[in-house]
Image (tube, rainbow, N blue to C red):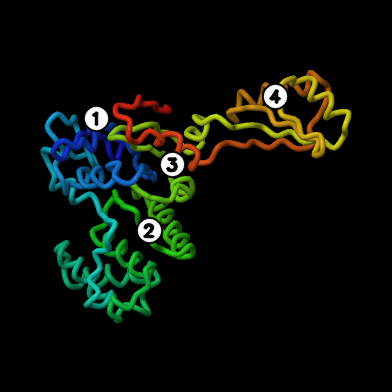
């Protein structure tokens, strides 16, 4: 457990008759990006609020440890170890970027000298020096988000919760934010990310969990999740018609593209499956000029796992 930044077992939360989290288990290794996906209203933000001590879980929830601290017994130590950037910016638009940073330094009880040093370093790190003395209300959406995360880092947290940090940003600002997140993880920070953008999770996350109907529908790496969904195949392309015909005979029931001299072989893209295909080619004495693995993308995974969002008590499937 010592190498886990977050370990939560049987996480439960209801609001009246509405069950939001129904026994959710989450484990996040240190120094990684963990992404929680799910439809709107699936409970992603509720999970973040519980893990960041903003909301109490229901009775019956199991142990929750964040940063090595017991959330129920020692919430203050949890708060000292984390930073939170919510869906809505905490930036005060009536004061300057620098003043926002110094305000956070005061809240963290840094000395005046240390606060100014920390604010200056973070403003430079997030490319906000030129705008530092301008009202934050004049900042673009991307600048406000950068300032928001910079403010979160004033307390030097080792775990950061980013709740939909790029919602509403243009593509360039979103990619800039991705670079910031990668930099945080390179520095040893653990990032717990919720996002509406599946491409973002695919790009950044070491592990992904899909939350649906209050439960984890599946979790694993992006590649593991993609293999859960039918439709994956290996495409073999040939330049020699004879080799193409020989391979088609060797594999039997495959999808043929006679014009392109290509075969589509159903496959999950695993190492074992690829080895079987290569062995079959060797046995047939033919060689493909091109081999391409095609797997469903995270959009396919998301829609397949959340298609029955109104159906209660869906079975849980977990990739380990």
Q: Quadrant of the C terminus?
A: top left
Q: CA distance from mark 2 to mark 3?
A: 21 Å
Q: Secondary structure at mark 1?
A: strand
Q: CA distance from mark 1 to mark 3?
A: 23 Å
Left or right relative to 170: residue 56: left
Q: Quadrant of residue 304?
A: top left
Mark 1 nearby-residue class (10 Å; few <14, some 14–19, many ≥20): some
Left or right relative to 146: residue 280: right
Q: Secondary structure at mark 4?
A: helix
Q: Which residue is mark 2?
A: 167
Between discs 4 and 1, the one toward the N terminus? 1
Task: Please tell me whether mark 2 or mark 3 is closer to you in this view.
Answer: 2
Q: Quadrant of residue 36?
A: top left
Residue placed most toward the observer, 183 or 244 = 244
Say the numbered circle drawn on residue 206: 3
Mark 4 nearby-residue class (10 Å; few <14, some 14–19, many ≥20): some
Q: Which residue is mark 1?
A: 23
Task: Please tell me whether mark 4 or mark 1 is closer to you in this view.
Answer: 1
Say the numbered circle drawn on residue 161: none
Q: CA distance from mark 3 to mark 4?
A: 28 Å
Residue placed most toward the observer, 83 or 284 = 284
Q: CA distance from mark 4 to mark 1?
A: 41 Å
At 34% from the left edge and 53% from the top edge, which residue is drawn? Answer: 164
Say the numbered circle drawn on residue 277: 4
Percent across and percent down for residue 114 are 22, 68
């Amino acid at each position: 457990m010592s190498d886990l930044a977050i370990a939560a077992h049987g996480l439960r939360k209801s609001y009246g008759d509405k069950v939001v989290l129904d026994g959710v288990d989450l484990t996040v290794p240190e120094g990684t990006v963990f992404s929680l996906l799910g439809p709107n209203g699936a409970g992603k933000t509720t999970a973040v609020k519980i893990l960041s001590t903003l909301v109490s879980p229901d009775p019956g929830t199991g142990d929750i440890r964040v940063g090595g601290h017991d959330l129920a017994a020692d919430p203050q130590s949890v708060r000292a170890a984390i930073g939170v950037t919510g869906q809505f910016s905490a930036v005060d638009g009536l004061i300057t970027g620098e003043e926002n940073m110094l305000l956070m330094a005061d809240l963290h009880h840094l000395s005046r000298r240390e606060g100014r040093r920390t604010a200056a370093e973070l403003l430079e790190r997030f490319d906000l020096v030129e705008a530092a003395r301008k009202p934050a209300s004049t900042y673009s959406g991307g600048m406000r988000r950068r300032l928001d995360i910079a403010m979160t880092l004033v307390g030097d947290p080792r775990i950061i919760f980013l709740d939909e940090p790029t919602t509403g940003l243009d593509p360039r600002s979103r990619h800039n934010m991705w670079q910031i997140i990668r930099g945080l993880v390179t520095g040893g920070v653990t990032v717990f990310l919720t996002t509406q953008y599946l491409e973002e999770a695919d790009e950044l996350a070491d592990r992904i969990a899909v939350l649906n109907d209050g439960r984890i529908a599946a979790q694993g790496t992006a590649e593991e999740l993609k293999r859960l969904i039918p439709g994956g195949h290996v495409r073999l392309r040939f330049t020699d018609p004879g080799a193409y015909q020989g391979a088609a005979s060797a594999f039997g029931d495959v999808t043929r593209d006679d014009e392109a001299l290509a075969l589509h072989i159903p496959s999950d893209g695993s190492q074992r499956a690829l080895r079987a295909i290569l062995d079959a080619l060797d046995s047939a004495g033919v060689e493909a000029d091109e081999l391409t693995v095609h797997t469903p993308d995270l959009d396919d995974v998301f829609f397949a796992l959340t298609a029955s969002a109104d159906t209660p008590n869906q079975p849980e499937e977990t990739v380990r």
